[in-house]
Image: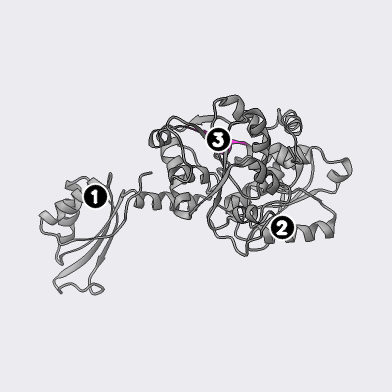
Amino acid sequence: MSTTVSLADIQSARRTLRDVILATPVIPAARLSSELGASVYYKAENTQHSGSFKIRGAYNTISHLSREEKARGVIAPSAGNHAQGVAMAAQLCGVQAVIVMPERAPLTKVVATRRLGAEVVLAGAGFDEAVAHARMLQEQHGYTYVHAFDHPRVIAGQGTIGFELAEALPDLQTLVVPIGGGGLISGIAIALKALLPMVRIIGVQAAGCAPVPDSLAAGCPIRLATARTIADGIAVKSPGELTLPIIAELVDDVVTVDEDEIVFGIAHVVQNSRLVVEGAGAAGVAALLAGKVALQPGEVVATILCGGNIDSNLLTRALETALVRQGRYLLLRTSVDDRPGGLAGLVNRVAEVGASVLDLFHRRAMWRVPIDRAGVELVLEVRDEEHAQAVFDHLAHHGYSCERGDVGSWPV
């Protein structure tokens, strides 16, 4: 194997991390298994210290710095999860940490990083701009730079997940791993291909930031001009110089998922496994749900829920979007007599068929309705698409002329 990181390096990292990290659970994904006809498991790194796998590589790197390197303090750029991993690792090692994050980094990640004792500097629109600013501060102040993915000790630290998977799932046939810069999938691939040689490893990138397929085709890292995705944890415009050759050698395929598919992945995990994941953490689930990974009946499959540090507002929007696609929300427009009790009659009819009113907009002159009537727009919570149609039919039966919003459906 021509990689710069060996199985022995990952074994050494495992000894370093033994009393620092959690051996996160491998959880059966019952609903997804049923839908796919396979045996699917989640490696729940969203339950790890600091909410992601990043503490593994960060601590394995910082703990091995020389006394002089530690004394200078460390600096790291991050979209969020590496920030918390470095901040926690630095705190454990008694080292000053400065973290450079994009200006629009999720508030949850910024606050959590500061709580871990790190100084947070907000700079740039995305991860790559944060990298440039971190390099500038490193030159000015002499900090020791801790790379987010392209360093042998970082890769080795992330690779410890591979050992845990091989022990928990010795019959594992396919592993689906989100890819940002490539440190996670590189470390895991080195470990798993040595321990379970027949395992198939599939990488997943967000379609709005997917430099790896083009980089593999070109034989060198390709840098994208833009990155646009809610999966900020994997929004890296270029893979690493170290990680790309490992991916080329050991990863069997790389697929992409779009924003809607990522949203459905987030919602599926929350609704069916009661686990909170961010966009990057749901990328593997999204790929499986969308049929991007071909599976055989009964195949043993796992995916890494690599992070759970999602902003609460984004989580709310993701769940609401998924509910709309599932047909759980119904938008209706109709009209009622513009007199006392007119609106109450409509709401009572909705209640008779078991729907719940979430929002109600009562309009007069804004709608083209007769002067003796008022337009009404209802957002209703229903059980499923069949129930939505029953509500529509019930109102029509009682004389309400309704227009139904096209909310669509999605089997999450």
Q: Is residue 101 magenta?
A: no
Residue 216: x and y, percent?
A: 64, 52
Amino acid bearing label 1: Ala
Q: Residues within 10 Å of mark 1 (few under 14, many from 20)?
A: many
Residue at the (10%, 59%) spot, across then down: 399
Q: Secondary structure at mark 1?
A: helix
Please say if 121 is above or below 366. above
Q: Secondary structure at mark 3?
A: loop
- Badge 2 is on which residue? 131
Q: Which portion, as a residue range, is magenta? A: 40-48
Residue at the (10%, 54%) spot, across then down: 397
Mark 1 and 3 residues: CB-CB less than 8 Å, in contact? no
Amino acid bearing label 3: Ala
Earlier in the chain: of badge 1 and badge 2, it is 2
Earlier in the chain: of badge 1 and badge 3, it is 3
Quarter residue 375 falls in: bottom left
Earlier in the chain: of badge 3 and badge 2, it is 3
Mark 3 and 2 residues: CB-CB less than 8 Å, in contact? no
Quarter residue 8 falls in: top right
Residue 317: x and y, percent?
A: 44, 53
Q: CA distance from mark 1 to mark 3?
A: 35 Å
Quarter residue 229 falls in: bottom right
- Mark number for residue 44? 3
- Badge 1 is on which residue? 388
Q: Residues within 10 Å of mark 2 (few under 14, many from 20)?
A: many
Q: Is residue 46 magenta?
A: yes
Residue 398: x and y, percent?
A: 10, 55
Front residue (pair 214, 165):
214
Amino acid bearing label 2: Val
